[in-house]
Image (spheres, rainbow, N blue to C red):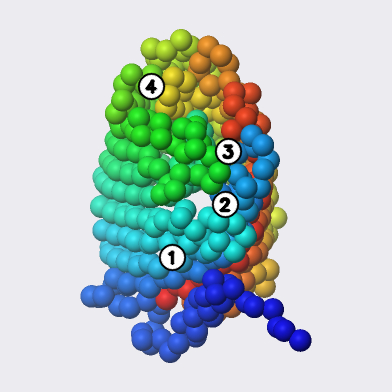
Amino acid sequence: MTLPRIPARLTALVGALCAAVVLARAPAAQAEGNGFLVGDTARLHLMLEVEPRYDSLAGQGGIGATNDPSIDPADVILHVRPGLKLVAPSPNVDFAGQAKLDWNYYTALLAQTGDLSYLGVELNANLVLGKDGPVGLTLDDTFSRSDRTTNPTLGLGTITDHNTLAARLRVAPGGGAIEGGLGYNFQVESYELSKAANIGCTEDVCNGTKYGQYGSQTHAFSLDARWKFLPKTAIVFDATETLRVYDTQSANVPVSPLRIEGGLAGLLTEKVRFVLKGGYLNTFSSGQVNFVGMIGQAELAFMPIEAASLSAYGQRSVEPVSATYAWYEDWRFGLAGKILIAGRLSLTADGHLDRLAYGDAVGRSDLMGTLEAQAALEIRKELTVSLGTILNTRQSSDDPLFTYNRAEVYLRVTVDY
């Protein structure tokens, strides 16, 4: 009798999971508290995530065009995410920063996807000055390199480099019942190609060679105010002027959206929280179609006990987007819930449906559905094991390449010391 041969990649995958568990159970170098003490109050945390993930569209090919598994192969992707986190609180100044790598290793256990492996990056830093005083300043910076682009006009397999620098000056006279802020947000976004383009597809629409011309810079200037007229309920207002500039002007339509919103946010009862906002938006688009209309957001959350919540939400938003579309409108409706059992097992789920309409004369529209569910077990303070799934479906009136179904299942081991 001949025993079945275990693939070397699968052996490495199991070994990485075991190493993460062993690391979590190693003796702590710091006797008290989590992390390593730096100075008097700051702590440096070491992090590691190991996550094998089954992805039914790992090949990132001609999505939905043929439903051919040689074009859209499923495979197992091993994510290895080492990282560092520094938290430095003080009476008047808070700082927190995190750096994390994400090695996306395409195991080629189920398909020939090995050339698609790449290194992702996630960096963020937050500085708060004068946090409890009448005047304060908040600075945030976030950078990511990932194939999970938020640009709805682009297909899968596009590696996005995105950086956001944000600043907000806060003024809260008279004990904080009234608060106002001035903000500035600067975003830079660019797109790369996958190393081997996409499996089984050589056309430009599949391998992403046209995406480089969609890089952009966005400047957003904001004014916000809040009046807490009840202990736990406030009137809120915010206005934002956004300027979007593209690296290749001839391939895109610049827009300068003006958004003005106001409403209420707070508690109806001790167990019911709500947000209700509405307002006006004008994209000031130089393209074929300009959006002028109402936008808004509504959310109702019920918290029967401290460890559980259920919320329903809906919104209508309009955002700038690349190519000749100029902007897109998003109607979103969803449900979300979470519960903590025995202080260690958390169950979360979020499902939402989006209808996207684009600002072009053709009238392209996409219907997207997303369901995410996760069970996370805290084995000990430094070690958490999570099992989750993400299901996506998309139907597009414009191009069959944007019509697809995607299923992902992952097992994640997280070490945070």
Judged from the image, the secondary structure of the residue bearing numbered disc 4 is: loop
Residue under numbered circle 1: 81
Residue under numbered circle 2: 58
Q: State left or right for residue 189 relative to residue 387.
A: left
Quadrant position of the C terminus in the picture: bottom left
Q: Are marks 2 and 4 in contact (CB under 8 Å)?
A: no
Q: Quadrant of residue 51?
A: bottom right
Q: Residue visible at 29% across and 53% down?
A: 128
Q: Amino acid at mark 1?
A: Arg
Residue under numbered circle 4: 252
Report how far apart the C-alphas of labels 1 and 4 lie in the structure.
Answer: 35 Å
Q: Is residue 382 above or below residue 408?
A: below
Which of label 2 and label 4 is nearer to you?
2
Report how far apart the C-alphas of labels 3 and 4 lie in the structure.
Answer: 24 Å
Judged from the image, the secondary structure of the residue bearing numbered disc 2 is: loop
Q: State left or right for residue 375 relative to residue 20.
A: right
Total of numbered circles in the picture?
4
Closer to the N terminus: mark 3 or mark 1? 3
Q: Amino acid at mark 3?
A: Gly
Residue 334 seen by the camera = no
